[in-house]
Image: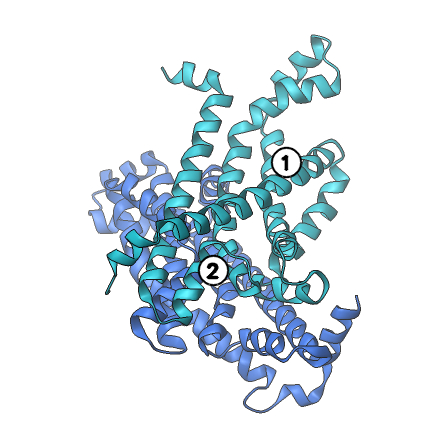
Amino acid sequence: MNIQWDWIAGNLDEIAAATLDHLWLTLIAVGVGFALSLTLGIMAYRRRSLYGPIAGVAGLLYTIPSLALFMVLVPFTGLSVLTAEIGLVSYTLLILVRGVVSGLDGVPRDAVEAATGMGYTASERLARVELPLAVPVIVAALRLATVTTIGLVMVTALIGEGGLGQLMLRGFNRSFPTMVYVGVVASVILAVALDLALVGLQRWLTPWARARAA
Amino acid sequence: MEIAGGGIAWLLDPAHWSGPNGIPLRVFEHVALSAAALLVAAVIAVPVGLYTGHTGRWGTTVTNVASLGRAVPSYALLLVFFTLTGALGAPTTLPTLVLLAIPPLLVGAHVTIREVDRDTVEAGRGMGMRELQVLRRVELPAGMPLILVGGRTAAVQVVATATLGALVAGGGLGRYIVDGFALRGEEGTARLVAGAILVALLAIATERAFSLVERRTVVPGAGTGSRSIGAAPRAGLGL
């Protein structure tokens, strides 16, 4: 473990740029994946017969090895952010669709019926009762998807993206261990930071849970 | 569709089913590496999980270690181990896969024992069982299906990730993917896709095999109980 601290001190801007790049690739993937999954999940929740096919396709995408998916896309979309994001988004779908559907399924029937009794339309009920009550389960899925995506962004270094993965790969090719260690430590810090942010988001979105605990 | 067709044609070519780069040998390498990693991880993680679950101590530590472990990307670990050992193939891939498999196994074993009905455990103690007997005769049989759920998650992840071993000149099905990408062209793409199909099939087969064993190990009387409490911890494990 021969770490050259002076390299780290002298290249903080390069490390920060790689971390930021990694963060962006992750946020785009989880953001787009979540938008798709929320739509698909609500569709599957309202119309049960759609859940099988949706989960089936998402499951199929999930089983494709990441290395192969990124590489197979290269002839079509090139060594680009788009190639990386298509793969990254694909891998979030299974986790997130499952999270949305099981979150909505877990909403107490009483609450749904009370909302209906108060004259809420289906979409009002979804926005004001069902989705808010499903937040804990959905956020749990988001946390898992985010950690997974941070790991997969690393792999996209092989197709020219990768943020911190790129930093590690360059260190690896130059036989410069410091860069490799910096990459892995920074990615763990990034994962922990995003995880804490999501926990904070959940607390902010579910004030009633805090009130009950207090 | 054309791409998938090329991959399937590659798979059906009898020439690819023999020799040192043949499918049977690559599948064997892949399975052997995955099984070895899973075994080593189980030997490390399960006793620790059983201990922490039984005593109820270190519970938060276990969950924290496991979630930190999940935050370390396998690809990054692979590069780190290669940098540390400088060795190609299994000496680098095996520790990577072991570390990947430990979190789900550890949490699985810990949660399993914690979730066993405390009254049942007390009844065991009341019958004069010693602590080890309580663990072996009460907690383990009741919690077995859930331990296997942790094992299933670990196994599927390991089988999928063992593919990365080819990046450090290891064997296994990742060879087809990495070599196919390097080769490019029609033959290269076909080989890459064939490798992807094989890894996916192997992962699905692993999942099915574990599900089958899970169903077989439900102890009479313990079955329904441990199933119904299974949902909550499972969600926590992200399974």
Q: Chain of mark 2?
A: A
Q: Position of residue B11 (x, y in %)?
A: 69, 79
Rate crowding at label 1 as few (under 14), some (14 to 19) or many (20 or more) other CA atoms within 10 Å: many
Secondary structure of the residue carrying tag 2 is: helix
Rate crowding at label 2 as few (under 14), some (14 to 19) or many (20 or more) other CA atoms within 10 Å: many
**Residue at the spot x=69%, y=74% of the render?**
B189
Q: Is residue A18 above or below residue B166?
A: above
Residue that numbered label 2 is attached to: A166
In the rendered structure, which disc, 1 or 2, sits on the residue that comes first in sequence?
Answer: 1
| Residue type at tag 1 | Val
| Residue type at tag 2 | Gln
Counting labels gives 2
Q: Quadrant of residue B14?
A: bottom right
Q: Is residue A3 left or right of residue B170?
A: left
Q: Is residue A178 above or below residue B171?
A: above
Spatial distance from mark 1 to mark 2, Cα to Cα? 36 Å
Q: Quadrant of residue B42?
A: bottom left
Q: Chain B's shade in the image? A: blue
Q: Chain of mark 1?
A: A
Residue A205, can we see it? yes
Marker disc for residue A101: 1
